[in-house]
Amino acid sequence: MKNLILLAFFLSTSAFSNTIEANEQLTQATLDNGLKIIVKTDRRAPVFISQLWYKVGASDEKQPNTGISHMLEHMMFKGTHDYKVGEFSKIIARNGGNDNAFTSKDYTAYYQKMHNSKLELAIKMEADRMRNLTFSGIELEKERQVVIEERRLRVEDNPNAKVYENLRLISFDQKGAYHAPVIGFQSDIETYRLSDLRHWYETYYAPNNATLVVVGDVDPQEVINHAKRYFGQYSSNSNIEKIKRYASIAKTSQSKKLELKAKLPFYTLGFHVPSLKTTTDENQAYQLEMLAYVLDNGLSKKLIRNQQIASAISVSYRLYDKHDTLFIISFVPADGVDNQTLIDAIKNQVKELIEKPELIQDELVRTKAQLEAGFVFEQDLIHTQAYYLGMLETVGLGIDKMFTYVAKMNEIKAKDISNIAKQYLDFSQVNSVELITKAIK
Amino acid sequence: MKLLILFLLLITQANAKVNIDQWTTPEGAKVLFTQTKGLPMLDVALNFDAASSRDGDKHGLASLTSSLIGTASKYHTEEQIIKQFESLGTEFSSASLKDMSIISMRSLTRRDILQSSLNLFTEVVTKVDYQQHYLSREKKQTLRAIEAAKQSPGSIANTRFNELVFGQHPYAHKKIGTKESLEKINLADLIQHYQRYYVAKNLTIALVGDISKTKAMQIARQISHGLNSGKKAPRNELVLPLTKTIQEHIEFPSTQTHLLIGQVGINRTHADYYPLYLGNHILGGSGLNSLLSQEIREQRGLAYSTSSYFTKMQSNGFFLINLQTKNSQADQARKVVLETLKNFRNNEIDPQNLQDGKDNIIGGFALETASNANILTYLSIIGFYELPLDYLSSFTDKIKNISTKDIKNAYERLINMQKLVILTVGVKK
């Protein structure tokens, strides 16, 4: 009882993104078999989200098995020894829940969102499919077609998605991570064998390669007890640390023109950069993150609102990637404006930022205010909270990074942004993909 | 100690249900407010009945009128407004649909921040300065969006489906307009649209966050005070049902065919609202567990996603089933969808499906209001569409006694298998 009162009190008094108070709602544990457990209480509504994260994703794949992590994610809904095909989602739904899964470069994750009286059920069923999956050939054939349709929908019929796919193809060597798309090449999707999937499952789906994250109105001890009961008997995979994980291998000064049936031109530039995980100086990663915000704001103001030579522009940096990654600038030029005009304008903006950091001083202050408020706003959705906890743990950064983010960003000075831009935004090394429009009819 | 217990009670009560306060400002704006504890933030949504169904023959007018809010006010330029919101860490956004034009703000509740945010927000919304150069710029941006839609088979299909289902109704046209319609719109049209529709009596204010009711009343008063009282917009007429089946194909060089099958739907006060809602949940509104997903994806591997839904609007919206499948399978998929719909309409569903649907909706209802963002949407809908204040608290009661027969009867009354829109976009073999 006392516990509850205290927790409730912390919730209401944690007025701002204060790292100490926020951590009072957190409980962490590790089972003997290596399963990591993270619980964050949020008592605003009598619900929870439970996510199970596996440390495996597209960056662990090689041809001819690109996309196999994602394919396995689909197969995880196809039944175990105790539950028939499709029963997983059906039982969760009958109990008022909704469930799904997502795969990315560095992780595969499964989740259930439910009323808090259903906590045990969610953990029990997720634990069951860590071990007891039935691999049916018939189900694989159907699901293979579903995944090919998914690829058509997301990539084949979406010109800009093809541009991004190609940027990774030319920027990363195929011998390392991040070259192939998460969903896989179509030729690979067409040819996985059941034994490939089973092998993937047996290799990576082990308690010492997984993290259970629960956020919501739950008792942390109860989460740990359920996890012990249902995951506790599984043995760990003693080879997991020995599996070779391939880093990304950068290729520079690459460019490609893609002629596609499309109406709008699209251009994307990728600069090789370290991530928070790979950098030798963490400050640099946060500086790159800040650079992305400042450039995005600055370019939108100047090129879209002011000069009106771009109709869309975006700058992004993948702070939390497990391997060296890309800093990406993409744009759609305004009607009648050629790409080179935009590229020159972007170069000028970068040059100005490097030479006159004092000009971004105010911008920096405003961005920090936005990040500080944004941290509070993000707490509104339990799945966002769970996502950051699970992702940070899975890529090996640890969950403290969630609570130190705002403080680290606050330390950054204009001169830091200038230096980091100078170091990494080297246009002589940049990779680019250009979409050239071809008439649709 | 006493204080702590009181506090605990408050929290428990907040968990049990969403308490909604409703009142009207002196100028005539309707206000709905829910206090939530735990996060020091406030969401404000201003829902004006000022969207594309009010375009008249100037398609795109409502959307442009909305997108210029936030550009300039009587006292500040666009860049000043953007910088001020950024400095406060406050999020400002606007969106314009067919019924609602929504202007929203999310701010921290720290006193200085909240008050400055509200002052700026109120000014931006109530003292708009429509300027030609912003209109020209937004028109150019809209023209790019129109072009972008033409390279997406999904967008082409949606646009055409709306035109076919809604016919002559003001819901039929694309809200961003066309190249031709944009040419006819000038600054005076925007000012006129604003003056007529952005008025207190045409507004529902939704407020959700960690503030007192007294504070909420002050905020609503402040926003409303800057607006003219005006008149509530008259209701749009109901959409007329289709008179015959319309089959149409649009040739487009995509690898998949987008298939859309549907007809005129319902509004939120329709007599069969709840059986249709539950029925749709079972038919195509519950992801992989729905009957359509079972038939299309799980049994046949024909598509990655298929679903059915009702757009529930002021006038009746549409009912739609859609999916995407490789071009050569389009015919097969169409047959499966039509067969599934026909069976669903003509026969009572399996009682187990009914029970599963109810259990999912009722057992998971707490998830519907688990975030401030979700509650804000519900308050906006309840206020704007004049739903009863117990809409949320009575929802599960309305669902629990529906029978398989109720669903069959409701679908029999609404769905006419001889008067459907059947639209495909893709490559025909």
Image: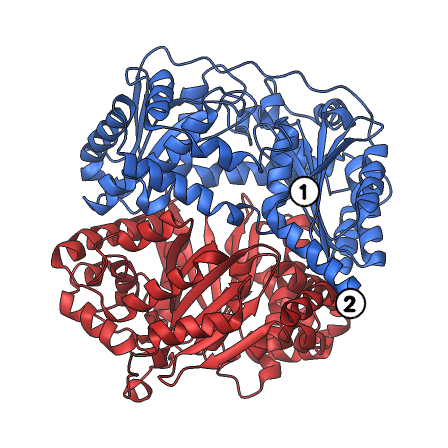
Chain colours: A red, B blue
* Residue A365, horizontal then vertical, whole percent: 76, 67
Query: What element does badge 2 sit on?
Result: loop
Which numbered disc, 2 or 1, marks the residue that appears first in the sequence? 2
| Res. A430 in view | no
Report the Cα–Cα distance between label 2 and label 1: 26 Å
At x 39% / y 65%, what residue is drawn? A123
| Res. B282 in view | yes
The residue that label 2 is drawn on is B1
Between residues B213 and B177, which one lies in front from this camera angle? B213
At x 36% / y 47%, what residue is drawn? A94
* Residue A4, horizontal then vertical, whole percent: 63, 67
2 and 1 marks on the same chain: yes
B91 to A54, vertically: above or below: above
Q: Chain of mark 2?
A: B
Between residues A349 and B75, which one lies in front from this camera angle? B75
At x 48% / y 83%, what residue is drawn? A278
Give the residue furthest to the top: B243
Q: Which mark is residue B19?
A: 1
Q: Report which quarter residue A281 is drawn in.
A: bottom right
